[in-house]
Image: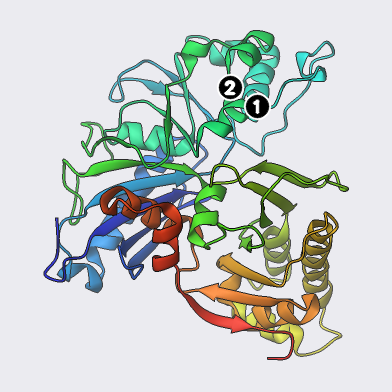
């Protein structure tokens, strides 16, 4: 399980909304390979196809030739998405179209959701599906989050992964299931992230055979929902630390010691990745999407993001200027809303596809007046996955492994 340098190597994957990202990361936080594979469609089976294609691409990377067999596999995913499954066997079961986090949730006229005590992010989606299309869920025996489903298909036992027990009310419990007419037996048992839940086993009906780095018997580590892994992957694990997760949408997260009084309904307060701490979040729903819509409408889909941003910022009359200004204002507003709770944000660690453009990072630093830091691995979910794996094999806690493995490569200030 070790290379000549006595390193551990982790195969990390993250199921995003539109694509799967995968990386090979060692236990010192060095990235040895990265792949991104778009999904063919919105069916869960596309995730399995994308996983095998990403594994092929990583195995073919020149940097992979010197690696020994992978120490562990870990997968994170978007939420609160659920995959309805008919059957208990990962090889023969039928997986229905996922209930995606972005799907609208219609509310029945007489709805238990109107009462107090419903904190689950997942059960309202199931309730709506049962109310407005019960035939679609007929015969369903289990519900999995994306990372749990893919791990199950690859050899994990069926589980529901929690960051820690403080998250149980945000998933489900007996009282909420009773009120929303959901059956507790639909949901696999809870485990805490970082639990070893099985070993890699390639199922017979896999779209592609195992290749290169992956081999049967690799331990599967339970990965949590993407935003929790991004907190770990940006080192946002102490009160006062903040991160900005960019992509199709954008989310600014601030770690606080206690749940604040929230003056804006646009802010979200949730338990943090670290028990006893809290996450205060501001969501910018269409940050990256807005830019991509402009790129498509202007016929510049093939132009690199950094090149187009440079062109837009070079003159104030550019037609794309309004788009960038809109995104920038949303970022500043998110920071102002978070600071409206009595907290102060001076530094922010960025992650995701948007922070790969230096000029845009500098522009955000200038308009916000904050110091922005770019980690060596910008895909924070993957970096967080690797850090969580290292806690399993090193015996250290997640703060220690994150601190050792997450390194800053660039810093942007108001006047730099």
Image coords of residue 301 (percent x, y):
61, 69
- The residue nearer to you, when weighing 234 against 141, is 234
* Label pair 1/2, CB-CB below 8 angstroms: yes
Q: Residue at x 16, y 41 (%)?
A: 217
| Residue 250 appears in the rendering | no
- The residue nearer to you, when weighing 152 against 176, is 176
Image coords of residue 412 (percent x, y):
64, 83
Q: Mark 2 highlights which residue?
A: 172
- Scheme of image coloration: rainbow
Q: Quadrant of residue 316?
A: bottom right
Is 349 displayed left or right of 394 in the figure?
right
- The residue nearer to you, when weighing 377 against 322, is 377
Is 35 displayed left or right of 329 in the figure?
left
Q: Residue at x 32, y 68 (%)?
A: 28
The correct choice, above or below, for 238 with respect to 137 in the image is below
Identify the secondary structure beneath mark 1. loop
Is 205 displayed left or right of 303 in the figure?
left
Callout 1 environment at 10 Å: few (<14), some (14 to 19), or many (20+)?
Answer: some
Is 272 displayed left or right of 59 in the figure?
right
Q: Mark 1 highlights which residue?
A: 120
Question: What residue occupies the far left of the structure in this picture?
Answer: 4
Q: Residue at x 63, y 37 (%)?
A: 101
The correct choice, above or below, for 270 with respect to 127 in the image is below
Identify the secondary structure beneath mark 2. loop
Does label 1 or label 2 sit earlier along the sequence?
1
Image coords of residue 36 (percent x, y):
43, 59
Give the CA distance from mark 1 to mark 2. Answer: 6 Å
Badge number at residue 400 = none
Screen quadrant of the N terminus: bottom left
């Amino acid at each position: 399980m070790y290379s000549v340098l006595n390193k551990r190597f982790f195969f990390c994957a993250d199921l995003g909304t539109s694509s799967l990202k995968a990386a090979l990361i060692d236990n010192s936080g060095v990235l040895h390979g990265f792949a991104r594979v778009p999904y063919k469609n919105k069916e869960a089976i596309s995730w399995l196809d994308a996983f095998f294609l990403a594994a092929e691409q990583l195995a073919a990377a020149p940097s992979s030739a010197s690696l020994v067999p992978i120490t562990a596999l870990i997968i994170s995913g978007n939420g609160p998405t659920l995959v309805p499954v008919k059957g208990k066997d990962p090889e023969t079961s039928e997986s229905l179209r996922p209930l995606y986090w972005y799907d609208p949730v219609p509310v029945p006229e007489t709805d238990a959701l109107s009462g107090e005590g419903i904190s689950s992010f997942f059960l309202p989606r199931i309730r709506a599906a049962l109310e407005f299309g019960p035939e679609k869920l007929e015969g369903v025996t289990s519900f999995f989050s994306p990372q749990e489903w893919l791990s199950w298909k690859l050899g994990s036992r069926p589980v529901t992964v929690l960051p820690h027990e403080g998250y149980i009310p945000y998933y489900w419990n007996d009282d909420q299931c009773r009120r929303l007419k959901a059956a507790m037996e639909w949901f696999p048992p809870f485990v805490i992230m970082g639990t070893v839940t099985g070993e890699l086993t390639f199922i017979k009906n896999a779209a592609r055979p195992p290749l290169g780095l992956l081999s049967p018997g690799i331990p599967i580590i339970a990965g949590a929902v993407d935003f929790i892994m991004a907190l770990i992957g940006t080192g946002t694990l102490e009160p006062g630390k903040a991160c900005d997760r960019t992509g199709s949408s954008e989310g600014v997260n601030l770690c606080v010691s206690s749940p604040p009084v929230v003056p804006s309904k646009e802010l979200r307060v949730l338990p943090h990745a670290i028990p006893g701490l809290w996450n205060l979040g501001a969501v910018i729903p269409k940050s990256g999407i807005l830019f991509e819509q402009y790129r498509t409408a202007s016929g510049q889909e093939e132009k690199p993001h950094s090149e187009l941003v440079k062109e837009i910022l070079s003159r104030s009359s550019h037609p794309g200027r309004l788009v960038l200004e809109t995104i920038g204002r949303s970022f500043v507003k998110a920071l102002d809303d978070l600071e409206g709770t009595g907290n102060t944000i001076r530094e922010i660690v960025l992650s995701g596809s948007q922070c790969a453009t230096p000029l845009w990072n500098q522009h955000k630093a200038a308009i916000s007046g904050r110091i922005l830091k770019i980690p060596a691995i910008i895909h924070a979910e993957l970096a967080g996955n690797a850090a969580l794996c290292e806690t399993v094999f090193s015996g250290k806690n997640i703060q220690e492994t994150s601190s050792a493995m997450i390194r800053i490569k660039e810093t942007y200030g108001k006047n730099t």
